[in-house]
Amino acid sequence: MTLTAGRQNAIAEPDPQSELAELLRTGPFPAALRAAIQASGLSLDRVQYRLRAKGASVSVATLSNWQSGRRQPEGDASFAVLANLESVLGLPSSALRALVGPPRPRGRYAPNTLSAPAMEAMWTAKDRLTALLSTVDTSSDALLTRLSQHDLVEVDSSGAQRRVRVRQVLRADADGVDRWVVVYSPGHPRGAAAELVPLRHCALGRGSVDDTGLMVAELLFEAPLARGETIMMEYDLVNPPGMAGRSGDVFTRKFRRPVRDYLIEVQFAPAAPPRRCTQISAPLDQPTQFRRRALTVSPAGAAHAVALDFGPGTFGIQWDL
């Protein structure tokens, strides 16, 4: 789990071809396929039509599932389609095939084996985060399915983010899963770190903070989980004193693996409601290309946004006071 809070950086115009080349080199498969289809300028219907002309039969729904990460090609028939798909999209032979992971186990509690970026890959401070992650145990992360997540961000009358209350439900995909790793940066101008406060069904484990306030910490479960068992945790991230209010601000969460449902709510001081609130989201392969949707602020000064089956990518709320 990763979070960011603070002013959003200026968005640079990406080079689609260089992004595609990088994704074909590093993956993951869904992001590379999505970028290749976008670069081709073809709709999924046209891709299906051209595949059919080559004798490769596949549904639009299957293509959509492949590029979203809900499914991946498996078996000789799917790989034959994939070879023709590489040709249709103008890619080198086996460019996509090389990115497909091992077959996914079947059954109700199949492990979460879809390709996911490294935890540090979604952050600009990759080197600093890599060093911090080396001090904690991240082995449980790939064995937890993200079922539900609720973030409540409290903004005071000065415009400063004071606290984030987090409630999440996770399911173990293997026996022995016993912790969750939190990555958080409050964006404090003097590099002060937030306080991580366990509230329900978890306790503090090891953690590290660097001189910019970037924090990595373990939340230990009350007991190791058996495969298929779920846990509901609550905890607070209390930002350090001295956080200055900002007229324009943003809170985002970075998902390296999909979440079934995500709710983000920002509660503003009743006396200082925002002039504008916007939902923002970006897929993993286009981290600077935010999709935007205007949000309504309630009479009580709250705004919220919901994402279903979201990720990998970034999702959050941006506002102007």
Image: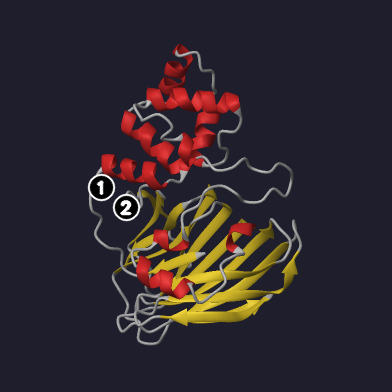
Can residue 268 be spotted in the picture? no
Q: Rate crowding at label 2 as few (under 14), some (14 to 19) or many (20 or more) other CA atoms within 10 Å.
A: some
Quarter holding residue 252: bottom left
Q: Which residue lies under the disc numbered 1?
A: 14
How far across and how far down the image is residue 293, in percent?
39, 49
Q: 133 and 299: which one is in front?
A: 133
Q: 201 and 164: which one is in front?
A: 201
Type of amino acid under label 1: Pro
Secondary element at tag 2: loop
Secondary element at tag 1: loop
Left-right relation of 80 to 13: right
Q: Rate crowding at label 1 as few (under 14), some (14 to 19) or many (20 or more) other CA atoms within 10 Å.
A: few
Quarter holding residue 10: bottom left
How far across and how far down the image is residue 234, in percent?
62, 72
Q: Which of marks 2 and 1 precedes in the sequence?
A: 1
Marks 2 and 1: in contact by CB < 8 Å? yes
The residue most toward the bottom is 241
Quadrant containing the C terminus is bottom left
Q: Which residue lies under the disc numbered 2?
A: 288
How far across and how far down the image is residue 251, in percent?
41, 65
User: From mark 1 to mark 2, how far is it between C-alphas?
Assistant: 8 Å
Residue at point 50% right, 52% down? 116
